[in-house]
Amino acid sequence: KAGVTQTPRYLIKTRGQQVTLSCSPISGHRSVSWYQQTPGQGLQFLFEYFSETQRNKGNFPGRFSGRQFSNSRSEMNVSTLELGDSALYLCASNDGTLSGELFFGEGSRLTVL
Amino acid sequence: AQSVSQHNHHVILSEAASLELGCNYSYGGTVNLFWYVQYPGQHLQLLLKYFSGDPLVKGIKGFEAEFIKSKFSFNLRKPSVQWSDTAEYFCALPTGNSGGYQKVTFGTGTKLQVIP
């Protein structure tokens, strides 16, 4: 079956702009979570959605937001971009259980100039 | 609050050498633990997981890990590494909140470089 698909794969923005990233989970997975990956910080949890409800969120400012649609596709938005937002944004889907393996997408690499 | 520590940030080994990557966690609830691997240019994928039962778990490509509750550890091992094991390895701890799932706390990762 098809894996997790993230779009766009690469994007360049300037400070102050906003960006929307998209994630299509594996068919049948109702949980989608987002992570920010940077060389110094590793993977930092942003938020997790299950059946259109945000169940958990990490310690990121309110500029980072997300949503999930009825077909389980998810988007995350970052407003008022800062240089420090440059990172690889990873989306992962699973069956919503603690023992469930996370299936990751290739990521969206955001560069903020 | 939960946390995961990986103390080895960069490990360089020759082929056929044995590997042990450290992972320590801090969490007061039921513990599940994972090791994920990211090969160069590829997405993160599951290497192995501990959910319950036998504390010695075996994963893909000859990797294994042992959950030692008394030491809060889940170290990854492989008796003989290959050049193709060159990758970044992440230890991960999934935890739930009152709303259900789901937050996975990752260690900062260990970059393994295997020299032919």
Image (cartoon, rainbow, N blue to C red):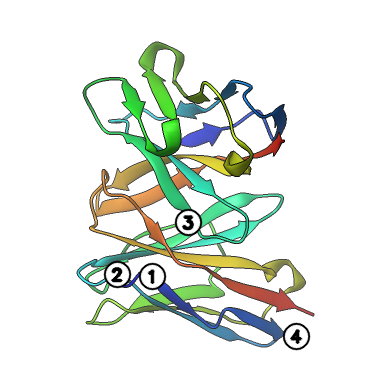
Residue A108 at x, y percent in the picture: 57, 74
Mark 4 or 3: in front is: 4
- Give the mark nearer the N terminus: 2 vs 3: 2
Q: Quadrant of residue A94?
A: bottom left
Check the residue under mark 1 and report the chain it is in: A
- Give the mark nearer the N terminus: 2 vs 1: 1
Mark 2 or 4: in front is: 2
Q: Which residue is mark 1?
A: A4
Which amino acid does the dot numbered 2 rest on? Answer: Ile
Q: Secondary structure at mark 2?
A: loop
Local packing at callout 1 (Cα closer than 10 Å; few below 14, some 14-19, many 20+) is many
Mark 4 or 1: in front is: 1
Badges 2 and 1, same chain: yes
In-front residue for pair B59/B97: B59
Mark 2 or 3: in front is: 2
Give the numbered dot on residue A58.
3
Which amino acid does the dot numbered 4 rest on? Answer: Thr
Residue A10 at x, y percent in the picture: 63, 80
Task: From this view, report whether residue A3 is shown above or below residue B53.
Answer: below
* Residue beneath the point at 40% across and 11% down: B70
* Residue beneath the point at 56% across and 52% down: A43
* Residue beneath the point at 40% across and 30% down: B27
Give the numbered dot on residue A26.
2
Instruction: Tell me if residue B108 can be seen.
Output: no
Give the numbered dot on residue B50.
none
Q: Quadrant of residue A91?
A: bottom left
Badges 2 and 4, same chain: yes
Q: Secondary structure at mark 1?
A: loop
The reply to whether discs 2 and 1 touch (Cβ–Cβ < 8 Å) is: yes
For marks 2 and 3, give the CA distance: 23 Å
The reply to whether discs 2 and 3 touch (Cβ–Cβ < 8 Å) is: no
Specify the quadrant that holds the N terminus of chain A.
bottom left
